[in-house]
Amino acid sequence: MNARPRAGAARVLVVEDSSSIGTAVAAALEHVGHIALHVVDGRDLETTLTQFAPDLVVLDLMLPGRDGIELLAVVKSSSDAGVLLLTARDGVADRVNGLQAGADDYLVKPFDMQELIARAAAVLRRLGRTPSTIRSGDILVDSESGAATRNGQDLQLTSTEWRLLIYLAQQRGRTVSKTQILTQVWGYDNYDPNVVEVHVSALRKKLENHGPRVIDTVRGIGYVLQS
């Protein structure tokens, strides 16, 4: 099946029998701009896939009733969604079996929520399912045209400032470190963190030309774009 480009948020189906884990994962994904739906088992997975039409399925392999590998086959045969597997099994054979069955990525429990968000974003990027527009309050970033506006006014950003704004908008409301920014915006972390300060300062000034401050410095940690 061909990928469906999205004009809005990506849709993520979370299939996880633990209500606490599933609810937390769905909430975290929604916090970074996705539309998330949590179900506790795969009994009606075919119907859910048709009705919800997810771009990504976060699938626990150890579910009651239907085997996770069986459910993975259902996802792959009846939709074009990517699949991020979750499991408590950390053996190499388990990871290989899941990937060979068609999973796009694999995460072992217990996991860090930030890593799950990053892995989900990476799968969505590879599948071409990232939203073409990202909105944070009065800020709008268009990843297809390369434009960015605040209150309808063109921000005239450099390419680096534009990538920085996209990353901060994707993580809006969350504090991100300089290392995280270096890795996501520049592609590596072995670089002078002062470069981050310079570009954040330049981006902040351009944003404040059209509204109040929205990028805050969290001393000793990094930066946050207020949602």
Image: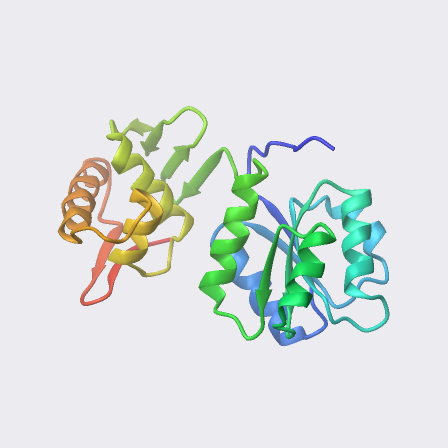
Residue 58 horizontal side relative to residue 119, left or right: right
Residue 47 appears at what percent x and percent y? Answer: 84, 50
The image's colouring method is rainbow
Image position of 4 (left or right of 52): left
Would you place residue 24 above or below residue 59 in this image? below
Quadrant location of residue 219? bottom left
Question: From this viewpoint, is residue 14 visible?
Answer: no
Say which residue appears at 51% left-offset and 49% top-offset. Answer: 121
* 200 vs 128: above or below: below
Q: Where does residue 4 sit, x and y in percent of width and height?
A: 65, 32
**Could you tell me residue 185's position as x and y percent?**
32, 44
Q: How many marks?
A: 0
Residue at 23% x, 36% y: name it.
Answer: 210
Q: Is residue 205 left or right of residue 13?
A: left
Question: From where the camera sits, is residue 224 visible?
Answer: yes
Q: Relative to 181, is 144 on the left or the right?
A: right
What residue do we see at 32% from left, 41% from top? Answer: 165
Outermost top residue = 145
- Image position, residue 117 (x, y; %): 50, 57
Q: Nearer the viewer, residue 12 or 69?
A: 69
Name which residue lies at 74% across and 53% down. Answer: 101
Locate the N terminus and report the quarter of the image it occupies.
Answer: top right
